Image (tube, rainbow, N blue to C red):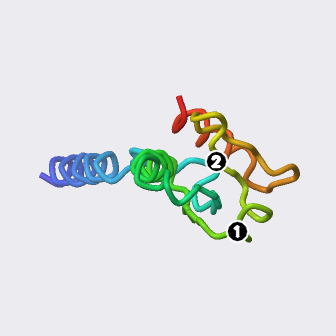
Amino acid sequence: MDATVRRLLVSSLAVLGLGCKKLSPVGKPPADAGTVVTVYVPPDAVDRLMGRLTAIAARHQWALSVRTDAAALAEADLVVADSAGALVGRLRPGSPAAAQARQLVDAALR
């Protein structure tokens, strides 16, 4: 009788131990999640680009700052400009968010 009780106790503890193992996270945030990317967009192009820019930033979990003021031309990580009727992106040299800005411009302006 004692042996049977011990076997039940040990097997119950083993089952509980296996059931309580640590699960791996389903989805890890990207390594650059939380990065703030500042983008200058001409006022007349905001309506065309805002949806695409925010969708890309949300997918990567980046904070996005879209500016239309003249000061942003010098401060933004990415400057979107109108060149002969087509929108083009220009990255600020030395920007801490240059890689993210490159991905934004590649995806938003295709």
The disc placed on residue 42 is none
| 100 and 66: which is toward the camera | 66
The residue that appears at 42% across and 47% down in the rendered structure is 48
The image's mark for residue 80 is 2
Q: Residue furthest top?
A: 110
Q: Quadrant of residue 72?
A: bottom right
Residue drawn at 22 percent across, 51 percent down: 12
Q: Answer yes or no: is residue 59 visible.
A: yes
The image quadrant that residue 68 belongs to is: bottom right
- Pick whichever, 32 or 63, lies toward us: 63
At label 1, which amino acid type do we have? Answer: Ala
Which type of secondary structure does the marked residue at label 1 adopt?
loop
Element at badge 2? strand
Seen in the image, is 6 located left or right of residue 61? left
Disc 2 versus disc 1: nearer the observer: 1
Query: Where residue 50 sits: x, y (%)?
Result: 44, 53
In this view, the residue farthest toward the front is: 84
Q: Is residue 38 left or right of residue 7?
A: right
Residue 25 in the image: x percent, y percent?
Answer: 43, 48
**Residue 98, how many percent across, how many down?**
75, 47
Out of 69 and 94, give the one closest to the viewer: 69
The amino acid type, in three-letter code, at marker 2 is Val
Q: Position of residue 80 (x, y in %)?
A: 64, 48
- Give the camera-side residue of 20 and 41: 41
Which residue is label 1 attached to? 70
Mark pair 2, 1: CA separation: 12 Å
Q: Is residue 56 above or below residue 43?
A: above
Rendered residue at 59%/38% (across/down): 87
